[in-house]
């Protein structure tokens, strides 16, 4: 199991800064181009902490076509970032991942999902605290549900974690893209303090552990 080795450094970096600390200094980024999305693609929706970090991870995977940061799992339509941060919308910071299943399978995405955050901390990832940072898989169909539940059970049984996995597995009811300035955050704001001290160390560890799954230069 790679989990504990990888996350020991991943979570340690997170105590320095919180995800929302730089929200007032973000650039007005442009949304990704959809021209490469085809009918052969599939979609996964995950929540596993600050989407500035998780977006950067999944964008690097070979077979992933597009990653959109957004909000999912709540009851408020079209929420703003500020509303979600108030912790009363029910939404989690989430990713919608468009991928080519001929190149990367859903269970491989699950592997990356579970190995790049702590799924045993309820409503928290490192220094990011609140229900918007909860661990969740929003499945799109019964196949995704079954694979997620089986993987979660296997992970719990493995003993990789001292505490039980609290990741919620629930049907996708909604997904609202976040504001443009949240999209491609790490790529466009790489010199910002949160990127330098939190995201960059996480990415370096991720790239070492999953080097066989990364996009080619």
Image (cartoon, helix red, strand yellow):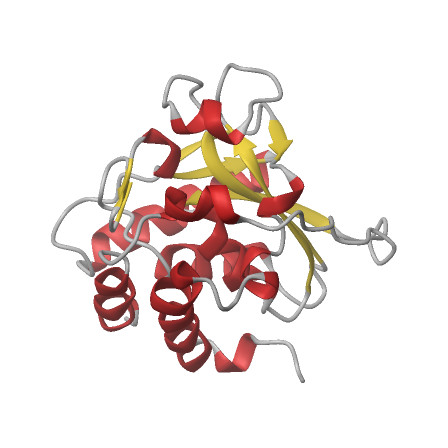
Q: Is 201 on the left-hand or right-hand side of 27? A: left
Q: Residue furthest bottom?
A: 217
The foreground one among 2 and 130 is 130
The foreground one among 133 and 127 is 127
The foreground one among 139 and 11 is 11
User: What residue is at 21 percent from the left and 63 percent from the top?
Assistant: 12
Picture layout, residue 164 above or below residue 14: above
Q: Residue furthest front?
A: 25
Residue 207, how many percent across, how many down?
46, 77
Q: Give the image quarter of residue 104.
A: bottom right
Query: The C terminus is located in which quarter?
Result: bottom right
Picture layout, residue 4 above or below residue 182: below
- Is there any visible trace of residue 89 in the rendered image? yes
Residue 23, how many percent across, how many down?
47, 43
Q: Is 201 on the left-hand or right-hand side of 24? A: left
User: What residue is at 62 percent from the left and 45 percent from the top?
Assistant: 181
Q: Residue furthest left?
A: 162
User: What residue is at 29 percent from the left and 54 percent from the top?
Assistant: 17
Residue 62, how many percent across, how many down?
64, 71
Picture layout, residue 10 above or below residue 68: below
User: What residue is at 57 percent from the left and 29 percent from the top?
Assistant: 172
The foreground one among 62 and 75 is 75
Residue 156, how many percent across, how many down?
24, 50
Picture layout, residue 127 above or below residue 115: above
Query: The N terminus is located in which quarter?
Result: bottom left
Q: How many discs mark residues in the rendered view?
A: 0
- Is there any visible trace of residue 147 in the rendered image? no
């Amino acid at each position: 199991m790679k989990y504990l080795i990888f996350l020991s450094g991943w979570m340690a970096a997170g105590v320095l800064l919180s995800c929302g600390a730089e929200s007032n200094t973000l650039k007005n980024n442009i949304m990704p181009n959809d021209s490469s999305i085809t009918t052969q693609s599939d979609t996964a929706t995950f929540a596993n902490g600050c989407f500035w970090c998780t977006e950067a991870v999944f964008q690097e995977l070979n077979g992933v076509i597009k990653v959109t940061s957004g909000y999912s799992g709540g009851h408020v339509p079209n929420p703003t970032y500020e509303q979600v941060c108030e912790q009363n919308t029910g939404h989690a910071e989430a990713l919608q991942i468009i991928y080519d299943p001929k190149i990367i399978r859903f269970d491989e995405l699950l592997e990356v999902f579970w190995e790049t955050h702590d799924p045993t901390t309820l409503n928290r990832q490192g220094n990011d605290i609140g229900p918007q940072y909860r661990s969740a898989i929003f499945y799109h169909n019964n196949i995704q549900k079954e694979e997620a539940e089986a993987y979660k059970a296997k992970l719990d049984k493995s003993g990789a974690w001292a505490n039980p996995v609290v990741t919620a597995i629930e049907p996708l009811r909604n997904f609202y893209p976040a504001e443009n300035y949240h999209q491609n955050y790490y790529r466009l704001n790489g010199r910002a303090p949160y990127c330098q001290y939190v995201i960059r160390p996480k990415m370096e560890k991720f790239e070492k552990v999953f080097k066989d799954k990364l996009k080619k230069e």
